[in-house]
Amino acid sequence: MRTSARRLGGILGQILVFVSFFAAWELAVHVFGFKEVILPTPSATFVTMWAQRAYLLEHTWPTVIAILVGFGVAAVGGFVIAVGIAYSRWINEITYPFLVTAQVVPKIALAPLFLIWFGVGLLPKVVIAALIAFFPIVINTARGLNSVEPELVQFMRSLGASWWEIFFKISLPWALPYIFAAAKISMTLAVVGAVVGEFIASDVGLGYVVNYANITLETRVMFAGLLLLSLVGIALFLLVALVERYVLSWQPSVEAATPETM
Amino acid sequence: MRMKGVLVAFLAVTLAVTVMAGGARAADSVTLRLDWVIGSEHAPIYLALEKGFFREEGIDVRILAGEGSTVTVKLVGNKSNDFGYATADQALMAYAKGLPVVATAVVLQKSPSAIIFPKARPLTRLEDLYGKRLGTQIKSVVDKQWEAVARIQKIDRKRIKEIPSDRAIAASIANGNIDAGVAFFFNDGLQLEAKGMPMSWMLFSDLGLPMYSTSLLTHEDTIKEKPDLVRRFTRAFVKGWTYSKAHPEEALSLFLKANPNADPTYSRLKLPAVLSLTETPDTRQHGIGYSTRAGWEGMQKALLDMQLMDSPVDVSKVFTNEYLK
Amino acid sequence: MPNAPHISIQGLDVRYRTRAGWVTALEGLDLEVPPRSFVSVVGPSGCGKTTLLKVVSGILRPSRGRVLLDGAPLETLRLEGQVGFVFQRPLLLPWRTALDNVVLASEIVQKTVPRPVRAAEARRWLGITGLTGFEDRLPHELSGGMQQRVALSRALVFRPRILLMDEPFAALDEITREVLQGELLKIWSHIENTILFITHSISEAVLLSERVVVLSARPGRVLEILDIPFPRPRTEALRAEREFTELVEHIRGKLR
């Protein structure tokens, strides 16, 4: 009873934060008298979102596909590299500096080159999304795999378990909480990456909508696109969280783990 | 990150508030926001600065690099910068969207938008593009201009292989990925020429699309509140251009001195090309910066046709020749 | 239990390299562990007790000396699946139920045994260790003592010849510890395989084992080997006897 009441309070609080944010935004526009082309009100943005729903939705799917494919490539590629790093000191040592360098290079600076290398369409978006998103997967997966209790591995070896058995029965499930934590971060990064890709080399997608609306001074459409993009990002984040909750259902929930006082 | 859009909005609010708070400043210290990164197309502005034209008018000016005319008109329309150097079509569009910017001098009388191509594979008319690869800029109003030109010239765009190339037009031509590109001829075109690839172009302004281009802009309120400042600034600004037109070598060397990182070959090619765009029968008669109501009306009609504007405005509110005197 | 072996440890040296240089964990260690006996090793912390277990289980190769199982050198034997391990921490897989954690061991060792048979055997061991009714609980839903019972079941479910226990009760509260000590003895009386038991509790060693090996501080050397004469079954009541106290005091004196 108490936990569900507290939970409800938490959700109400979260909603309240959003509501106050939009209220403050609305108020600020009126108080400071911003021109709509500079900063539209949230209400005007919502109205535009509804009015332009067909246009916006048409451009939502290419973005969603780019995010998901980019994320998928990052997840699979990152996982494979992470396994190499976790189990081979040699691979770890030779690849780590490169990975860090690849991570800190601002991908957006390469933008015009991406256009030449990968052309226009899904490919450059996926490449950028995957490049931006794969780093957390690599780092966290490797960390997760390395965090396995050595005594447990020792126990498995004493039983005669093969590398594969240890990997699939112990290490992989052991690393899953780390992998999911990374996947949540990576999914949001993939959103950023796909949008960067759409800024550079695309004639479809919400990134294109935002960029184009900016040039044509349709700021309301630009904000509608941004808002929709945020919603897409939140939805995809929650999707990962949902899968995590299903896969890691064995984990003690935060509420169960927190002893009730009184 | 999941809140990206909201965050952007929040930052926009914060930024705008900060900018408004910083509104008060000393009378004659002003900012000028350029249209793009600094290049020799801005050499006459540097000349005015270096030769003290602004100082003579009692103005201390700070020149800021731009990120496209779209941003510049917003910054001027929001009074974040006192003056701006941006394209006239963007100014008109901004005015229609409720940003009261006014052009006090139309410096580039013709749009540098063009179809650019290597001289080695020449085009003589637009129909020559049929079956060829044309790099377009989908993230720019230049694309809309190309659309309009194609419409006016009755070009069947389906017969042209259009490849979105945006900021990579020059690189894509050099690479052989495209045969021609929609671009500012003095940017991508001359950039390639500076790299040793002789280039040629067809200007949109010669293809039936009359567009004023880069102009000096300020806010309606500034004109109302400080007409004298606007007059003095415009005068010094235009003087820079007039002087540069007469002494292009001096303008170039002053520019290269002020911007030692600029590519001298490219800068040398670009400046005369830019200066040539300042001259029309109108300016020969009335001086650099002069524009006509007919010219603005023609541009407005084109913008309405391109659906970049929803409804016409009174163009006489968007430009004035008053401060050229 | 299938042929519990005689373990013979002869002249064992274990050295390994750390950042600070070479460390000698064990030096000149000789020890006989008769079949079906319960031998405890006590000593100050860091005396190489755990190292000894690693050598006996075949995970760690000694620098010198050898370990014989029924006269055959360890390295010539395939030891996998013949050694059950219980650690100080239960080290259960948090995503597996108590039953599945026990089954884990037989999954590896008894691949040919049909799944339902493995499950039934695991269930039987959870019953022996007193966990009937808790088979489907996840580790975090069990107390520390119960988790250690699961770990014990997991170590025994595949019928290993040797049971190696590394301070298995050290992390438990006193009452739970005493209960589990009693139960271990009861279980051992049924299975009677060879148990090598490491502890830092002298009284625990004396209470449980037939033989106590006292190791010195690092490098670990055998200070004394004592045979514990008390008859079985032993109970907690033994602790009150004078002879018990004297033995504990004697060992404590050795370690001082």
Image (cartoon, coloured by chain):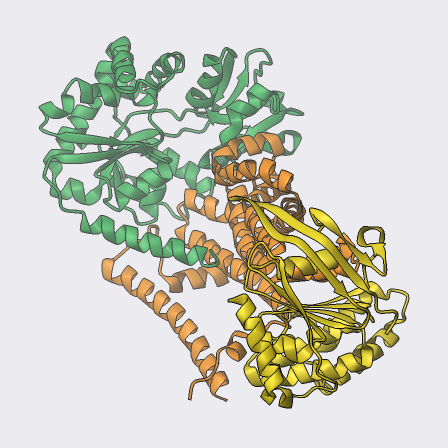
Chain colours: A orange, B green, C yellow
Against B94, residue B276 (above or below) is above
Looking at the image, which residue is at 61% across and 44% down?
A126
In the image shown, does C250 or A62 lie closer to the viewer? C250
Against C25, residue B216 (above or below) is above
Which corner quadrant holds the C terminus of chain B?
Answer: top left
| Residue C243 at least partly seen | yes
Q: Position of residue B159 (x, y in %)?
A: 66, 30
In the image shown, does B257 or B117 lie closer to the viewer? B257
Q: Position of residue A7 (x, y in %)?
A: 47, 80
| Residue B156 at least partly seen | no
Classify residue C175 as left or right of residue A230.
right
In the image shown, does B300 or A238 lie closer to the viewer? A238
Against C80, residue A95 (above or below) is above
Residue B66 in which image quadrant: top left
Q: Position of residue C57 (x, y in %)?
A: 74, 59
Against B123, residue A103 (above or below) is below
Residue C204 in which image quadrant: bottom right
Q: Position of residue A166 (x, y in %)?
A: 73, 57
Looking at the image, which residue is at 45% across and 21% down?
B185
